[in-house]
Amino acid sequence: MVTYKMESKVTLGAGIYAAMLMKARYADNRTISTVNNGNLTVTEIKENSSDMADFTRTDAGIMISAGYILRDGLEISGFYNKGLMDVKDPKAEFSNISFGLALSCRLQQF
């Protein structure tokens, strides 16, 4: 990631990432309604999986961040990552999205 420090203490960053799956789990809850001879039948399907074979092992994507430099090189920032690969097998348009906050320490400023 490349980070740009503005003239104020605000920083903006963008870049790419590559990742490898360590653990995976998901829940898929669906409701299916069918009408048969005027009778309504509602079926709830709950599927949970933690089988890593259901997912591809690699991902790559883009990331952006915005932060503010505090005193003594400390920085607080927020980030957003968006995966560009389909991470679920079979292909189900299931992508990786993450966001969060970070507290970092700048050891050397250029």
Image (cartoon, grey):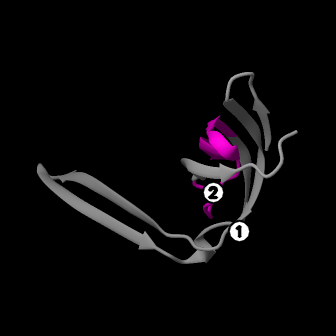
Which numbered mark, 2 or 1, is in the foreground of this view?
1
**Residue 62, x across and y down, in percent:** 72, 43
Of the pair 15 and 23, the residue shown nearer to us: 15
Residue drawn at 70 percent across, 45 percent down: 73
Is the Cβ of the residue at disc 2 closer than 8 Å to that at disc 1? no
Look at the image and tell me in which quarter the C terminus lies.
Answer: top right
Q: Amino acid at mark 1?
A: Arg
Residue drawn at 58 percent across, 73 percent down: 23
Q: Give the image quarter of residue 87.
A: bottom right
**Residue to which mark 1 is pinned:** 57
Query: Which span is picked out in magenta?
Result: 64-93
Outermost left residue: 39
Crowd around label 2: few <14 · some 14–19 · many ≥20 (10 Å): few
Secondary structure beneath dot 1 equals loop
Q: Is residue 68 magenta?
A: yes
Estimate the spatial distance between the alpha carbons at disc 2 and disc 1, rounded to whole Å. 13 Å
Q: Give the image quarter of residue 1.
A: top right
Horizontally, residue 87 falls left or right of residue 17, namely: left
Confirm whether residue 51 shows in the render.
yes
The correct choice, above or below, for 63 with respect to 90 in the image is: above
Horizontally, residue 5 falls left or right of residue 25, namely: right
Confirm whether residue 93 shows in the render.
no
**Residue to which mark 2 is pinned:** 91
